[in-house]
Amino acid sequence: MIGLWKNLYLRPRFFICLTAIVVLFVAAYFWPQIFFLPKLAVFTLTLLTLVDIFFCFRGKGALAAQRDTPERFSNGDENLVKLRVQNRYPFTAVLQIIDELPVQLQARTFALDATLKAGEEKILRYTIKPVERGEYAFGTLNVYASSPLGLVSKRYKFTQEVVVPVYPSFLQMRKYELYAISNRLTEAGVKKIRRVGHAMEFEQIRKYVRGDDYRTLNWKATARKSEFMVNHYEDEKSQQVYSCIDMGRVMEMPFGGMSLLDYAINASLVISNIALHKQDKAGIITFAHKLEAILPADGRSAQLERIMQLLYGQKTEFMESNFEALCAAIMQKINHRSLLLLFTNFETPSALQRQLPYLRKIARRHLVVTIFFENDEIKQALHKPANTTEEIYLKAIAENFLLEKKQIVKELQRYGLQAILTAPQLLSVQTINKYLEIKARGML
């Protein structure tokens, strides 16, 4: 009996009927001759409610539900969760499903509605979008079942507590990998880079096809075969590509619900996968006020999983980033000339000037690409009309911030350093573009 009252819930239809009965009682006060109507309504509602309780609470296990989650979620992407529900009632059941979602999502009004015929089984789907890495704990799966009368419902609690880790965006990584395999990177916004010269490795001699560079004609092979033959080249392989991720306080700034650090981590996973696909070696360096982690560049198949595991546990340090420690580690640990993709954020030219000596020192031995971020909110403020003195003042400040970002790019280029200034959501595409440009132009 205790379990009945504990899991018994009155539906909105019950309260609508109860309100109608109250109205009838008020009307009967003025017209006593209809007093029998509200009394009859009370009797009918009580009887129907008892019948509905009997239908909903008859037998055990009249409803089954199960949550299916993937082994891990992809950060910043829509991840699919499935709910498998089976109706074992002898009638059509109206269900309301409330899943206890992880606290990080702050989803307080989540609910799914479904109607299942007798004996029917359905798979319900919903997606969640995590915006930070870590462990996401799901709680109990609550299902409220009602009969066609719809006056009461019975709550079923299914213990489905599970913890799902959220990893860097492997869905984004797979998307770009698929584009790269099928040579359709341009569909994802990646530019085609014209190759300059032949700073590439010779691969084979093949037949000339329309569009080939006539400068690659192999005249000796042409004479032997009596048809045009060309030398075919491929990008140099086994070059080292390091993603250097700043985990200082400047990378905690949020955009679209995600921190700059998470954008950088997602892009690092994508570019590492692309580099491995191009048969280069990929590595990771993370630093804040000290060197946090360094994963030596490697081209073996297990390297991508090592990179993902390393990136999964990285957290922002709320301290000033120590570029001197980064410089010392690179000089000591990396002996071969490498491509260093430095993900950081400079808000002012003075912030760059403090770190510029270390960047120039690293650039003497390696090819450094400094990648930092545009402030989307400031850019949006520029497009708003300014009607008051305060709005004009704020717009002028916003223009000054954007100008300083452009000055940072020019300052880096003045010392021969590569630079990318990008919006956070375009980070992966811009990074791939720069990597392919460097490979095509033989700059490494």
Image: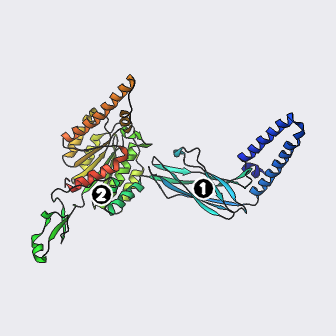
Name the foreground residue: 248 vs 85.
85
Q: CA distance from mark 1 to mark 2?
A: 40 Å
Judge the density around disc 1: few (<14), some (14-19), many (≥20) Cα neighbours within 10 Å.
some
Q: Secondary structure at mark 1?
A: loop
Numbered mark located on residue 323 in the image: none
Q: Residue furthest top?
A: 389
Q: Relative to 349, say whether 417 is above or below.
A: below
Q: Residue furthest right?
A: 33
Q: Locate residue 54 relative to residue 137 in the image: left or right.
A: right
Q: How is the image coloured?
A: rainbow
The residue positioned 42% from the left and 49% from the top of the image is 313
| Residue 210, x across and y down, in percent | 20, 66
Q: Which residue is mark 2?
A: 275
The residue positioned 34% from the left and 31% from the top of the image is 398
Q: Relative to 224, say whether 400 is above or below.
A: above
Q: Secondary structure at mark 2?
A: helix
Name which of mark 1 and mark 2 comes first in the sequence: 1
Q: Amino acid at mark 1?
A: Gln
Please indicate, yes or no, whether residue 293 appears anywhere in the rendered image: no
Q: Locate residue 99 relative to residue 94 in the image: left or right.
A: left
Q: Locate residue 10 relative to residue 76 in the image: left or right.
A: right
Q: Would you say the residues marked 1 and 2 are in contact, meaning their CB atoms lie under 8 Å apart?
A: no
Judge the density around disc 2: few (<14), some (14-19), many (≥20) Cα neighbours within 10 Å.
many
| Residue 442, x across and y down, in percent | 19, 55
Q: Locate residue 198 relative to residue 165 in the image: left or right.
A: left
Q: Amino acid at mark 2?
A: Ala
Q: Relative to 149, say whether 371 is above or below.
A: above
| Residue 198, x across and y down, in percent | 16, 60
The residue positioned 14% from the left and 71% from the top of the image is 228
| Residue 420, x across and y down, in percent | 28, 44
Numbered mark located on residue 160 in the image: 1
Please indicate, yes or no, whether residue 215 appears anywhere in the rendered image: yes
